[in-house]
């Protein structure tokens, strides 16, 4: 079960506040100028429209339409009550939701229109201009303050998301750079080994050739020198091979480094025992995790991401799934298309499923 985050708790609190302020009319304690069943229906429309506008749909046109419905329902609810009471709070809720559904300037226009509607409603029960201005002005200030606060929160969320994406990219680059440095070091050692063996084998060959053309003590001297060269060569080879000996890349450490210290996203990584991957395969898996985590942060709206790496015959299989809203017909962006091309070039494949959360399965031959 997905855990509730700050946004979900905020939405629940907003819903509770809306029910409380609408309670008197919902229960019949305050009359409305329209049948109470219709008023309850409008209230239900408002609640559903606010949920859709605040992120229940990924389609911009649907969010815009839902927000327009929420604004209209809020106006009708406030205007149709015999006594506004705390109902203008619904206008504050609608103003706050605008940051999730429409451009910021639209939110401020809605605040202005809300104020006009509220002033009209207050004028029905208050005869003094001062009372009307105070009533409408008070809620106008609350709406503006709420809107600015919501904009600040959204801006902070965007900055945190961008920071998390940069963090993932930097960690992945660090892992790949480390692997590249190890590869360069192995190449350097192999060249030194070639030069060393080539020189000493040449000396050894010459000594043995000289011993073959001599007899007695003189031949023995060449054989002894050849023996010393051979022993030195064996020692040098053992030392160099020991320096070159490296295990396969620590896949678990590499993948865990990428997802370390991510804000607002809990990532669980499970590496099955015995999973082995070569250098190119490790680089591909690192890039896969980077792309999956970045997409989860940017698009999925998820709280948790699970990544499993296991052996599948002679291949390594990476499976990543999140608890986000998914997409029944996912469209591959440049990052995922590049990932598919990378795995196919290594003889593997990548599959994407967005029907329940977002799931990526990447398979690559172990070596």
Image: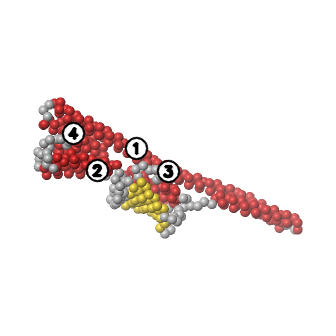
Rendered image quadrant of residue 3: bottom left
**Which residue is at the front of the view, 61 or 35?**
35
- For the N terminus, which image quadrant? bottom left
Choose mark 2 or mark 3, whichever is in front.
2
Asked whether the beta carbons under mark 1 and mark 2 sit within 8 Å of each other, the answer is no
Q: Residue at x 35, y 51 (%)?
A: 5
Q: Label 3: which residue?
A: 171
Which element carries disc 3, helix, strand or loop? helix
Horizontal relation, residue 302 to residue 232: left or right: left
Q: Secondary structure at mark 1?
A: helix
Name the spot of residue 216 as percent of width and height, x first.
88, 68
> What number is the disc on residue 159?
1
Label whose residue precedes the other's in the sequence (3 or 4): 4
Q: Position of residue 65 (x, y in %)?
A: 24, 48
Q: Which residue is mark 4?
A: 114
Compared to 208, does 54 lie above or below?
Answer: above
Residue at mark 3 to residue at mark 4: CA–CA distance: 48 Å
Residue 179 horizontal/vertical position (percent): 56, 55
Question: Which mark lies nearer to you, 4 or 2?
Answer: 2
Question: Label 2, on which residue?
Answer: 12
């Amino acid at each position: 079960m997905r855990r509730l985050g700050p946004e979900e708790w905020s939405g629940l609190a907003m819903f509770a506040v809306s029910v409380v302020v609408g309670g008197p009319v919902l229960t019949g304690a305050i009359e409305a100028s329209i049948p109470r069943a219709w008023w309850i229906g409008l209230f239900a429309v408002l609640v559903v429209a606010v949920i859709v506008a605040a992120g229940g749909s990924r389609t911009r046109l649907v969010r815009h339409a839902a927000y327009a419905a929420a604004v209209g329902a809020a106006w009708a609810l406030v205007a149709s009550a015999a006594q506004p009471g705390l109902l203008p709070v619904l206008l504050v809720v609608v103003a706050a939701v605008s940051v999730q559904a429409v451009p910021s300037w639209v939110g401020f226009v809605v605040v202005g229109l809300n104020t006009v509607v509220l002033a009209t409603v207050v004028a029905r029960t208050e005869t003094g201009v001062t009372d009307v201005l105070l009533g409408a002005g008070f809620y106008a200030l609350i709406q503006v303050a709420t809107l600015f606060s919501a904009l600040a929160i959204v801006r902070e969320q965007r900055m945190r998301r961008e920071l998390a994406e940069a963090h993932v990219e930097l960690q992945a680059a660090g892992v790949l750079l480390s692997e590249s440095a190890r590869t360069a070091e192995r190449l350097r050692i192999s060249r030194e080994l070639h030069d060393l063996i080539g020189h000493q084998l040449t000396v050894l060959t010459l000594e043995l050739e000289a011993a073959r053309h001599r007899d007695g003590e003189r031949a023995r001297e060449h054989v002894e020198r050849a023996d010393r060269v051979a022993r030195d060569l064996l020692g040098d080879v053992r030392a160099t091979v020991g320096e070159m000996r490296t295990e396969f890349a620590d896949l678990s450490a590499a993948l865990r480094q990428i997802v370390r210290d991510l804000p607002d996203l809990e990532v669980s990584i499970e590496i099955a025992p015995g999973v082995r991957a070569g250098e190119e395969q490790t680089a591909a898996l690192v890039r896969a995790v980077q792309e999956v985590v970045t997409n989860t942060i940017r698009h999925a709206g998820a709280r948790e991401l699970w990544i499993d790496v296991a052996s599948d015959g002679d291949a390594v299989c990476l499976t990543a799934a999140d608890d986000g809203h998914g997409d029944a017909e996912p469209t591959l962006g440049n990052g995922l298309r590049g990932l598919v091309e990378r795995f196919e070039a290594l003889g593997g494949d990548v599959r994407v499923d967005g029907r329940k959360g977002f799931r990526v399965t990447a398979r690559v031959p172990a070596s």
